[in-house]
Image (cartoon, rainbow, N blue to C red):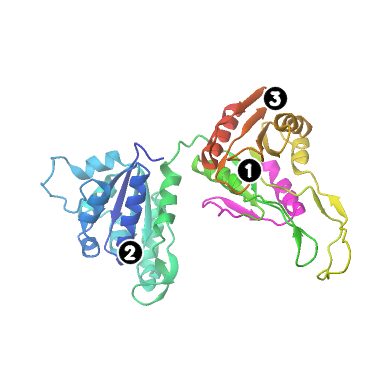
Amino acid sequence: MLKNKTVVLAVTGSIAAYKIASLASILKKLHADVQVLMTANATNFINPITFETLTGSKCLVDTFDRNFQYSVEHVSIAKQADVVMIAPASANVIGKIANGIADDMLTTTVMACKCHKIISPAMNTQMFENPIVQDNLAKLERFGYEVIQPAHGYLACGDTGAGKMPEPETLLQYILKEVAFQKDLTGKRILVTAGATRESIDPVRFITNHSSGKMGVALAKAAMLRGAQVILVAAHMEAKPPMFVDVVPVKSAQDMFEAVTSRAPHMDIIIKAAAVSDYTPASVADSKMKKKDGELSIELKRTQDILKYLGAHKHAGQFLCGFSMETDNVIENSRKKLTGKNADMICANSLRTAGAGFGVDTNIITLITESGEKELELMSKDDAAHEILTVIRDKMA
């Protein structure tokens, strides 16, 4: 994912420095070239040898270190860098960078970098809330730095509050957002639906389906990583919504209808990956329905067809993509859905095909458009999401 990408990790003097070893390891597993810079104070919390072992590259601390091939290192690394993350960022280093002070390897390199720079403050709550520190962070934001807000929690000093550096997995998402993929969807507004709607029978019971939401989440994440502005209308999901997307939680088919149709006029692309109930109880009991002898019948009524509504109200230039989960006659039924709903593409898959269907991390999809069909091989839902988005991008070109 990060092959041929250079990520610079700038580590300052904070107890949270040890967490960056995990981040460096994850980045290497994603095939990034990882360069680590440390302040002298940071070496009191974690040994540079740790980073050198994990990354395979020399960890730079001393601006005038002569124990490696000659180069103006702070300039050399700055030219290579695709993204810089300063984490943990102490109040001292934040103040230096904000005010143009470059007096060690870390600050001189950061100052020379023209790429995107991300800074993750980590310090005592009172220090973080100090107006001088806040002013310095605001200044860095004006200069184009991306500031990650610290987490709230128990701090090493014994206080509880803001100032805790987020976990490595969270920091990783900021890096991936910046450099993982080409930003070929920048400027596009994309709405994705995901998950299984729930139709209440009474305050205790509901009708639903087996959708995990994984495919919709993969699509929302892929679109975000490629630069799009993404809204995820999410029914019940087992999958965790991705960062950096606007999540609109819904429960029922009617909730989803209202959430989607109210936002649809402003979207460039709509991808309906949610499993929406076709029927809902005609009435919902106010109290729990008690068990009785004999059979029970529940009258159902049709829900509003969201895809059909969107197809009928699609504006010029808007791309509408639906999903079709079938057990029989997959292509035939999906093509009927394509024309009947006035969609631009249907992503069809079969519940009977191994590796496809609900709850799994893979999928086998056939992309059906008016002009033809494209069958995708078995792949992860993340990879399938990118394939779908690439076809949509090309169709809109």
Determine the CA span between mark 2 and mark 1: 42 Å
Residue at the disc numbered 3: 370
If the image is split into quadrants, where does the N terminus sit?
top left
Of the 4 image quadrants, the one containing the C terminus is top right
Q: Residues within 10 Å of mark 1 (few under 14, many from 20)?
A: many
Q: CA distance from mark 3 to mark 1?
A: 24 Å
Residue 140, given in percent of the width and then of the height, sits at 37, 54
Residue in the foreground of this view, choosing between 261 and 26: 26
Task: Please state which amino acid type lies under the numbered disc 2.
Answer: Ala
The percent coordinates of residue 184 (x first, y second) are 50, 34
Residue behind mark 2 = 16
Q: Is residue 322 above or below residue 12?
A: above
Quarter residue 205 falls in: bottom right
Residue at mark 1: 357
**Secondary element at image label 1:** loop
Residue at the limit of the structure toward the left, as seen here: 66
Name the side, left or right, on which 121 lies relative to 216.
Answer: left
Q: Which amino acid type is shown beneath numbered disc 3? A: Glu
**Mark pair 3, 2: CA separation:** 55 Å
Region rendered in magenta: 238-266
Residue lying at 87% horizontally and 61% vertically, measured from the top left: 296
